[in-house]
Image (cartoon, grey):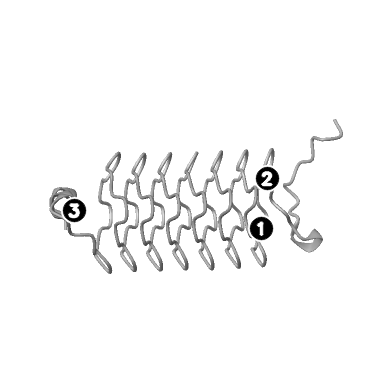
């Protein structure tokens, strides 16, 4: 399915695109609130500035996907694979990212307030300036993450990476 077909079907009221093969699709700047992309393959897609508020992306593949400035407020992303995704300033407020794989993702300036990140893989992510205020990060793997200027991210002592820079005493 290409972008035009999906947008046309969405405009006609269809919301269920679960398990769809959407690799490389360009949906930048589209408004797709409440869309069901459960289990869909969105590898290397462009979802930059896309409104996916309340979307279901559970168990979807988003490896290498661009989600810069995308709105995923309240989205269900449980078990999704965001490895190596570009998610600068992505809005993930109150999103469910339980068991999600974000390994190597760029989450610079991302807004994760109130998000569920239980058991999520955040290893090797770039979290500079990300806001985790009120987020549940219990069991999250944050080894080797870049956490400069990160707000609200609680990390167990055994999970603090060598790349963490504490500038509060400077």
Instruction: Give how far across and how far down residue 86 sits, in percent.
Output: 45, 46
Specify which label sits upstream in the sequence, 1 or 3. 3
Query: What's the residue at 76%, 51% (across, down)?
Result: 162
| Element class at badge 1 | loop
Which of pointers 3 and 2 lies earlier in the amino acid sequence?
A: 3
| Residue 36 in the figure: left or right of residue 148 | left
Element type at mark 3: helix
Do callouts 2 and 1 mark residues in contact (Cβ within 8 Å)? yes
Q: Secondary structure at mark 2?
A: loop
Q: Position of residue 77 (x, y in %)?
A: 44, 61
Q: Which mark is residue 10?
A: 3
Q: Is residue 122 above or below residue 28?
A: below
Report the residue at 27% width, 42% height from top. 30
Question: Would you name the residue on which mark 1 appears?
Answer: 142
Residue visible at 76% across and 55% down? 160
Label placed on residue 165? none
Q: In this orientation, which residue lies closer to the viewer: 65 or 90?
A: 90
- Looking at the rendered image, the quarter that the C terminus falls into is top right
* Rendering quarter of residue 55: bottom left
Instruction: Report the disc number at residue 147.
Output: 2
Q: CA distance from mark 3 to mark 2?
A: 38 Å
Q: Residues within 10 Å of mark 1 (few under 14, many from 20)?
A: many
**Image spot of residue 148 (x, y percent):** 69, 40
Which mark is in front, 1 or 3? 3
Q: Quadrant of residue 122?
A: bottom right
- Mark nearest the camera among 3 and 2 is 3
110 sits to left or right of 31 = right
């Amino acid at each position: 399915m290409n972008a035009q077909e999906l947008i046309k079907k969405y405009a006609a009221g269809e919301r269920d695109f679960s398990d769809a093969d959407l690799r490389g699709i360009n949906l930048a700047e589209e408004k797709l609130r409440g869309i069901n992309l459960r289990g869909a393959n969105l590898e290397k897609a462009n979802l930059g500035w896309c409104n996916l508020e309340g979307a279901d992306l559970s168990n979807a593949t988003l490896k290498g996907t661009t989600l810069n400035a995308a709105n995923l407020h309240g989205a269900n992303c449980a078990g999704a694979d965001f490895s190596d995704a570009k998610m600068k300033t992505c809005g993930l407020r109150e999103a469910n990212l339980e068991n999600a794989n974000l390994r190597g993702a760029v989450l610079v300036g991302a807004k994760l307030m109130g998000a569920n990140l239980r058991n999520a893989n955040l290893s090797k992510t770039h979290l500079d300036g990300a806001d985790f205020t009120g987020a549940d990060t219990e069991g999250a793997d944050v080894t080797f993450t870049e956490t400069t200027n990160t707000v609200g991210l609680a990390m167990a002592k055994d999970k603090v990476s060598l790349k963490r820079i504490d500038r509060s005493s400077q």
